[in-house]
Amino acid sequence: MLADKLPSREMILAELEYRATHRIESFYPETGPLRRENYPKHMDFFAAGARHNERLFLGGNRVGKSEGVGAYECVLHLTGKYPAWWRGRRFSHPVAVWAAGKDAKTTRDILQLALLGSGPQFGTGMIPADLILGTTPKPGVPEGVETIYVRHISGGRSEVQLKSFDSGVESFYGTKKHVVWIDEECEPGIYSEVLMRTLSTVPGEPNGIVLATLTPLWGMTSLVRDFLEAPKDGPKYFTQCTWDQAPHLSPAAREELWKSIPSYQRDARTRGIPQLGSGAIYKFADEDVLVSPFPIPDFWPRAYGLDVGWNKTAAIWGARNPETGVIYLYSEYYRGQAEPQVHTEAIKQHGPWIPGVIDPAARGRSQRDGSQLLELYKNACLDLEPAANAVEAGIFACEQLFSGGMLKAFSSLSNWSSEFRMYRRDQDGRVVKEFDHLLDAMRYLILSGRDRMTTQPQKPVPQIVYYTVPRRDGLDWMAR
C-alpha cells in the first residue's frame, strides 16, 4: 500500500529535529543550487588554511562570512569532524579557540548565535547539539555565554571562549590558542596580541591560525592594508567575496538591500572593497572625486602643500581653473627616510616657481624645530610659508569643496587615493593619525595655499630695436 511507504509523523519530526540540531551538515552539499562549487571564494579561503596561518575574508553583507566561513571552520576544528572534501588546516586533537566580536552584545547576537543557536536550549547553531558538553554564562550579559565546551572526535574536549574588543587588549593576554576567529574590525594592538597567542612555543610544533571575517566599513585600515599588501608566499592570505558570489542571495533580496545602503558604503557592503565606511571622514565615492589626468594649462594658478617627517614626507600639488574655480590635485610626492635635500630636489622638479605651504609644527616637532626646518627648506630656494594647522577647520573646508564639486583629484595619484580611503575617525570620533601624510598636505593647501596660488612667470619677450646705419654711398638702411 502507498500509505505504508510514506514516512510516519514521528519519522518526519525526528528528521526535522535532526536537521535543526545538525545545521552544519546542510552547508556546502555536493548537489543543489547551494552546492560547494557555487562558493569558490569560500572554498579558496578554507583551502588556504593549509598554507597560511593568517587569513582575511573580506565580504559584503549577507555573503555568509560570519556563519558560513568563521563559525563553520571553527566548528570543524572544535569537533575534528572534517568533511571528505576539506583541503584546509586540520587538527587531530582537541583545540582551544577564541571567537571575538566588536562588543559583548554583538558577540552574543552574532557569534554566539551562529555557534549555539537561540537559547536557552542551545543546539540549533553550527555546533551539533549532541556535541555540546556544556556552557558557562557571561557575567553582566543577559543570556550571554562565555565558554562553550565541545566533544572532539578523539574523545577529548575542545573549548571556545567568546570575547569582545571593547574589553581592551589586556583581555587578550593568555595562553596559546589553536584558533582565533575575529569577526569584524579590531584595533591593531588587539590583533597583534591575538597573533602572539597563536605562535608556537614548542620547537617543531606548528603555529595556530587566525581567521578574520569582516565587511571593510572602516575603509583601508592598517589591518586590511597589511593583508592586501602582503606577499603571496607569506603567512597572510585574503580573499574578497561579492554578492555575485553568494548564490543564496536572491535578486529580490539584493535589490532590497541595495536600496537601503548609502552610496558611499555600497562597494564595502556589496563587494567587500575597503573604500569608504562608517568611520570615513570624506564620505564620497571615487566617481564623485577622481577625474582622468589632463594637461594643466600654463595660465592656471598653482600651489602645493607639504607635510614633512622622517618616516614620510609628502607633498600634493593643486591647480585652479580660473573659469570655474575648481581646484584639481594633479601631482604628488611621497617618500620616507630621506634628508631634506633629497625632498627639496624632488619638489623643485615640479616647478621651483610654485609656492607652497608647510605644517608649522613639522609632524609633531616643537614649533621652534618646525620653524628651523621651514628655514632649511626656504634656504634651499623653495617658496614656502607656514600653513594654518587647524585640523577640523581644514577637514571641513575640504569636505565643503568636495561636496560642491569644487575639489577634484587626478586618478593617477595612487598614494593620495589610498590615504583618502583610509582617512577615518576612531570609535571616539578622533582622527586616526596614520597613513594621513598626503591628506594633511591637502588640508594645508586648501586652508592656506589657495591664497598663494600663482601662475608661472612669463619669460620676457625680446625687444626688437630698429636703427639706421649710414652707408658710404649716402643711402641709409635699416638694421635690428
Image: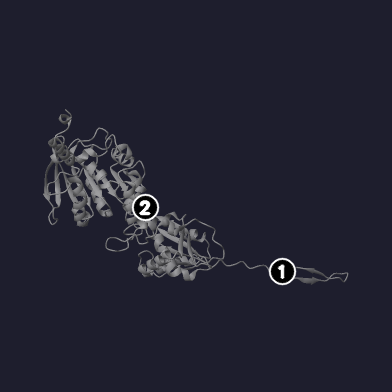
Counting other residues with Cα less than 10 Å from the Cα at mark 2, is it few (<14), some (14-19), or many (20 or more)? many
Image quarter where the N terminus lies is top left
Q: Residue furthest top?
A: 1
Between 388 and 159, the residue placed more toward the observer is 159
Q: How is the image coloured?
A: one colour
Between 423 and 72, the residue placed more toward the observer is 72
Q: Residue furthest front?
A: 1
Amino acid type at image mark 2: Asp
Residue drawn at x 32%, y 53% is: 256
The image shows residue 245, relative to residue 298, as above or below, that is above
- Indicate the secondary structure of the residue bearing disc 1: loop
Amino acid type at image mark 1: Ile
Residue named by callout 2: 267
Residue named by callout 1: 464
Q: Residue furthest right?
A: 473
Give the image location of residue 405, x and y in percent: 45, 64
- Indicate the secondary structure of the residue bearing disc 2: helix
Image quarter where the C terminus lies is bottom right
Give the image location of residue 62, x and y in percent: 29, 49
Callout 2 touching callout 1 (CB < 8 Å): no
Give the image location of residue 90, x and y in percent: 23, 36
Give the image location of residue 129, x and y in percent: 14, 41
In the image, taking residue 100 as reference, residue 44 lies left or right, namely right
- Asked if residue 358 shows in the view, the reply is no
Q: CA distance from mark 2 to mark 1?
A: 63 Å
- Asked if residue 118 shows in the view, the reply is yes
